[in-house]
Every structure is written in C-alpha cells, then in structure tokens.
Image (cartoon, grey):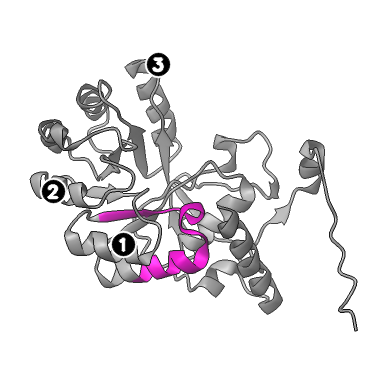
C-alpha cells in the first residue's frame, strides 16, 4: 500500500503537469462508472435486509454481502427472496475449503454474479478445481498481486472474474497491466474498495474508467463512510448508481485542508535546498 500511495501521487502530479484529468491520462474511456456496495455480516438477517434496501433505494447497481460458515446459504436464500432481481454477489474472504463444494453447489441456485475469494487468500490451484465444479463465477481478489498472477489464474481456469485493488497491486501501473491481461482474455474486472478516504476513492474512480472495468465496483459515495471527507466536493453517486469522473486536472478534486488540519496529530515539512556543488 505504501508503494501504491507514492506511485499514485506521481500519476496525479504528472496529470496535473499535463493539465489533463487523471482518468484520461491513465487511458480511461468512460467518464461515468457503475457503482456497487459491500455490506458486512450483520447481527441479524433483518438488519442485513434493511441495509440492502437502503442501498438499493439509493440506486446502487450491485450488492455484495459477506458470507462465512453458518452465514451463507440460508442468508443468500433470504436475500434472494426479498430481492429477486438485484445483482447480488457473495464475498467469502477465504472462509472455505474444497470440502465445501456441496455448499457452493447449493449457492448455484441463487443466481449470484460471483463468489469472491471463497478459498485461501494465496491460492489459484484449488480455486481452479472449485470453478470446474460450480456454475457461479469465481472472482479472485487477494490471490492477484500483479499481471502474472492474473495470467496464471486465467490460464488455470481459477476464476472468471477478477477484483483489482490499487493498494493490493501497488498502484496504477500494475493495475493497468492487469487490466490489459484480463481485457485481452475477456475476463471482466471491477474495482475493490479498502475503506478509502476521498483521495484513495478518487484514484479508484480514475482506475475504474479503463475499458476492462465492466462490472460495478466498490466505489461508493463519500457519505457512506464519512460525515466529512478530506476532498471537495465529496464523491457523489447518482440515483442510477453511477459516478461521473471529474474533468479537472489530476484527480479532479480539491483537498479539504480545514478537515485535514483538524484531524492532523503530527506534520513534517521537507524542504528542497537545491543540489550541492
């Protein structure tokens, strides 16, 4: 993540020097991206359904729910009963093994868009076995750190969808390489979220405009997580579940310096004094 922070800042600076939006500088083709949300495991099915209703009513185009042993088939069935038509996916965060193939075959009945990272975080081999056994698309997340991982996973048949997170892959350069590999192999990808504040969220918006990002990502409005974001204006999502990429140079958002100063506990200033003789 530290590498991604520095690299993405350089991409932003370069785009500003060129006076172009970052998303165009990256090679993005669409100034509007589709948005989804991720909803964690709740204290009860009723609370989960209430949260889903709120996000569906807000216009989000895809709902991701977390699943784990004991909170899987019955919960997905309950959600599908109340929301038969929404684009629904389950994120397992590596909670299962190949011994759970019968469970995944049950989940095949609920028309899920995908199952995200059902098996070990560093695996591509068992996922290939699982994908052969089930109809639902497997999506790899933590297993993909660079373009070579994506190439191997696609070649093995480990997944039919890939999630790209800028922090995980080390920044825009590697994300672009992964996007090219997946696009050339006709594997759809989407942008995963890591609870970013406004700056990280703005980078996610820019990345999501690339041609391979054809599925709604976890790029939501600032207000879902922050009473006041550290960028101006805050990220807004339309009633149809989309975000418009800004046309200003670089990220296209301004820093909310008052908010940043209010929460800063330590600050260092680095001054360049010029090259010595």
The structure residue drawn at horizontal position 29% and vertical position 41%, both measured from the top left corner, is 120
Direction bottom: furthest residue = 277
Task: Classify mark 3: residues with Cα within 10 Å, few (<14), some (14-19) or many (20+).
Answer: few
Image x and y of residue 214, in percent: 34, 59
Mark with earlier residue (3, 2)? 3
Q: Which residue is mark 3?
A: 43
The image quarter containing residue 179 is bottom left
Q: CA distance from mark 3 to mark 2?
A: 33 Å
**Label 3 SS:** loop
The structure residue drawn at horizontal position 77% and vertical position 41%, both measured from the top left corner, is 259
The structure residue drawn at horizontal position 45% and vertical position 60%, both measured from the top left corner, is 208
The structure residue drawn at horizontal position 62% and vertical position 48%, both measured from the top left corner, is 198
Task: Classify mark 1: residues with Cα within 10 Å, few (<14), some (14-19) or many (20+).
Answer: many
Q: Quarter of the image containing the C terminus?
A: bottom right
Nearer the observer: mark 3 or 1; the answer is 1
Q: Which residue is mark 1?
A: 150
Image x and y of residue 114, in percent: 25, 45
Q: Which residue is mark 2?
A: 129
Look at the image and give the residue range highlighted in magenta. Answer: 161-180
Label pair 3/2, CB-CB below 8 angstroms = no
Image x and y of residue 75, in percent: 26, 23
**Label 1 SS:** helix
Counting labels gives 3
Residue 236 vs residue 148: left or right?
Answer: right
């Amino acid at each position: 993540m530290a590498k991604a922070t520095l690299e993405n800042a350089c991409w932003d600076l370069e785009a500003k020097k060129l006076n172009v939006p970052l998303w165009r500088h990256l090679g993005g083709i669409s100034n509007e991206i589709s948005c989804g949300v991720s909803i964690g495991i709740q204290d009860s099915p009723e609370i989960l359904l209430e949260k889903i209703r709120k996000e569906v009513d807000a216009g989000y185009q895809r709902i991701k729910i977390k699943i784990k042993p004991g909170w899987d088939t019955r919960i997905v069935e309950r959600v599908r009963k109340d929301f038969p038509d929404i684009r629904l996916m389950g994120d397992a965060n590596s909670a299962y093994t190949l011994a759970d193939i019968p469970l995944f075959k049950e989940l095949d009945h609920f028309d899920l868009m995908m199952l995200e990272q059902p098996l070990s975080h560093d695996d591509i081999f068992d996922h290939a076995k699982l994908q052969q056994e089930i109809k639902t698309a497997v999506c790899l997340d933590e297993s993909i750190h660079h373009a070579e991982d994506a190439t191997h996973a696609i070649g093995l048949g480990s997944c039919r969808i890939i999630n790209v997170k800028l922090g995980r892959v080390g920044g825009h350069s590697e994300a672009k390489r992964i996007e090219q590999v997946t696009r050339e192999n006709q594997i759809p990808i989407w942008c995963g979220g890591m609870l970013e504040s406004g700056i990280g969220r703005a980078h996610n918006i820019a990345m999501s405009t690339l041609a391979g990002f054809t599925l709604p990502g976890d790029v939501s409005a600032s207000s879902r997580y922050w009473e006041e974001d550290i960028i101006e204006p805050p990220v807004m999502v339309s009633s149809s579940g989309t975000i418009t990429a800004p046309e200003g140079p670089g990220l296209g958002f301004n820093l909310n310096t008052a908010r940043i100063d209010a929460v800063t506990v330590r600050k260092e200033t680095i001054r360049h004094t010029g090259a010595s003789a």
